[in-house]
Amino acid sequence: MREILKVNTIFAEQINKECGEDVYSCYQCKKCALGCPTAYAMRYKPHQLIRAMQLGQKDLVLKDQSIWLCLSCQTCMTRCPQSLDFVKIADAARIIAEREGYENPVPEIAAFNSSFLSLVERFGRIYEIGLVALIKLKTKQITKDMVMGLHLFFKGKFGLLPRKAENINEVRRIFNNVKELESK
Ligand code: SF4
Ligand code: SF4
């Protein structure tokens, strides 16, 4: 008797609930991966991650570094015949991974993301030296890339003190709206 393959759809449903994208609309044409600037560094390319989601392979996706390497450039989305938004899908996978306590295989990226957002919320714009300091504190890699950092500093690429953006209240309003939405 032929066995009927039962697919676990729970992970795909979680992704759908988080970002509204339906991974089952992907038919594996690979156009996303072929245009992706960071696919070379990903263990699993965008279409492979989506396939794993279709098959309910949650651990494979959430334990791997690939979802964290997406640059949110949207090249894949513009190439996708199904208009799947992989940026939203990767973000949803990252949110689920953090919420469910998966260990992050590239903590520098999560440290960059949270530091960047906290500085933009505070100053309405980025403050480079503060960003470097926060990332170093979070990752405890104090001396990493120090030579490059000093090089940039002496070239005048880093302002010593933070400057607040003129539209700081607008920026804070956006952050407050997001927090309100997240708390619902
Ligand atoms: S381009 Fe779209 S349909 Fe094609 S593999 Fe990628 S996500 Fe799937
Ligand atoms: S959005 Fe992410 S997955 Fe898509 S092409 Fe850009 S880097 Fe690659």
Image (cartoon, rainbow, N blue to C red):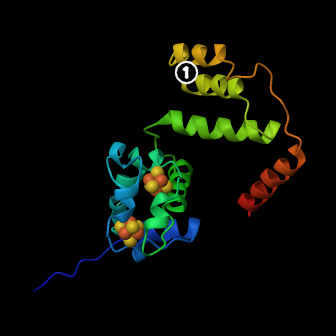
Name the secondary structure under disc 1: loop
Toward the viewer: 9 or 21? 21
Q: Is residue 14 left or right of residue 178?
A: left
Ligand 1 quarter of the rendering:
bottom left
Please provide percent x and percent y for residue 10: 43, 70
> Residue at label 1?
140
Please provide percent x and percent y for residue 177: 80, 58
Residue in view at x 62 percent, y 23 percent: 137
Quadrant of the image for the C terminus? bottom right
Residue in view at x 66 percent, y 26 percent: 134
Work out whether 133 lies above or below 6.
Answer: above
Work out whether 128 lies above or below 87.
Answer: above
Please count the marks in the image: 1
- Visible residue check, residue 56: no
Quadrant of the image for the N terminus? bottom left
Please provide percent x and percent y for residue 33: 36, 58
Residue in view at x 55 percent, y 21 percent: 140
Q: Is residue 130 left or right of residue 22?
A: right
Q: Which residue type does callout 1 highlight?
A: Lys
Q: Which residue occupies the extreme bottom position in the image?
A: 1
Q: Dot 1: few (<14), some (14–19), or many (≥20) neighbours within 10 Å?
A: few
- Visible residue check, residue 87: yes
